[in-house]
Image (cartoon, rainbow, N blue to C red):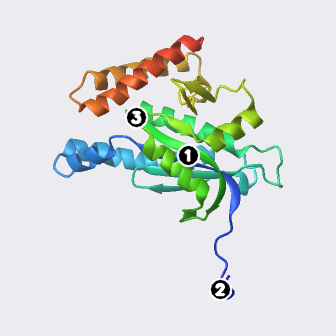
Amino acid sequence: MTGTKNCKKVIEFEERAVAFIDVLGFSPLVNSANDDSTYYEKLNKLIELLGSAIPLLDSKVSTEVPSELIPKHIYISDSIILSAPLSPDISPNYRGLSILVMRAIQLTHMLLNAGYLIKGGISVGKVWHSDTNIVGPAYQEAYKMESSGIAPHIRLTDSAMKYWKETEGGGNRMSLEYRGEFMVNGLHDFYINSSSQGTAKKAFAKYSEIIEENVNGNLPEPARYKWWWMSQYLVHENQTNVFV
């Protein structure tokens, strides 16, 4: 191509799974934090949580796992962007999409436990992901999927859904069909951050209290709808799981 012969090669696209995840209600919190110390404290704690969430999860990965297989991430404002190689030569049995879905479930639990909802999109395809930037059609698809969503869930694009069904089959409940959309099963009880007996039951009880407080709180109708949607999804998962 004319004008590119002497161009230094910086971008190298790879086949990766990409997730774009946003915290809901962030902008009103920022606006309120400017004048109210209570909201400032809430914002400060949220920023701290977002900055530490992925490093904390990464720290629990076995040291035997090659570093290139641990998902890369970028954290900007209220957004977390993740990507992982789909099926790298170094480990052909590694399933990058499954790893990102797992991360999305873990983040759903962490943020809901702190009183926040998230939504997002996951795609697969060509992308370049450095320590400070991410570029590629798969990233754009994940971003568009997040932007077009309303409910507090993380949806898979058509390409990601197709890949998931081909590699994971129908028995893996980490992703599921709910209300006509194929999405991450963000409330999957296996990924609650504790292994003690009765943890899932206790966590769901706490989630129910947080959700009810927001549904009945003084929130704008769009925000109230998102919490109502989560209340219905929580009921669905309560009926699906048998807690011990």
Amino acid type of the residue that numbered disc 3 sits on in the rendered structure: Ala
Cα gap from disc 1 to disc 3, whole angstroms: 15 Å
Label 1: which secondary element: helix
Amino acid type of the residue that numbered disc 2 sits on in the rendered structure: Thr
| Residue 173 location, quadrant | top right
Q: Residue furthest front?
A: 2
Circle nearer the viewer, 1 or 3: 3
On the rendered structure, is 145 left or right of 221? right
Sequence-wise, the earlier of marks 3 and 2 is 2
Residue 72 screen position, x and y as percent = 61, 55
Residue in view at x 23 percent, y 33 percent: 220
Q: Is residue 229 above or below residue 52?
A: above
Label 3: which secondary element: loop
Q: Residue furthest left?
A: 35
Q: Is residue 64 above or below residue 184?
A: below
- Residue closest to the eye, 202 or 29: 29
Residue 127 screen position, x and y as percent = 64, 59
Residue in view at x 60 percent, y 30 percent: 191
On the rendered structure, is 166 left or right of 149? right
Q: Residue 56: which disc?
A: 1
Amino acid type of the residue that numbered disc 1 sits on in the rendered structure: Leu
Residue in view at x 48 percent, y 55 percent: 75
Sequence-wise, the earlier of marks 2 and 1 is 2
Q: Which residue in the protein does label 2 denote?
A: 2
Sequence-wise, the earlier of marks 1 and 3 is 1
Label 2: which secondary element: loop
Q: Residues within 10 Å of mark 1 (few under 14, many from 20)?
A: few
Q: Marks 3 and 2: CB-CB under 8 Å?
A: no
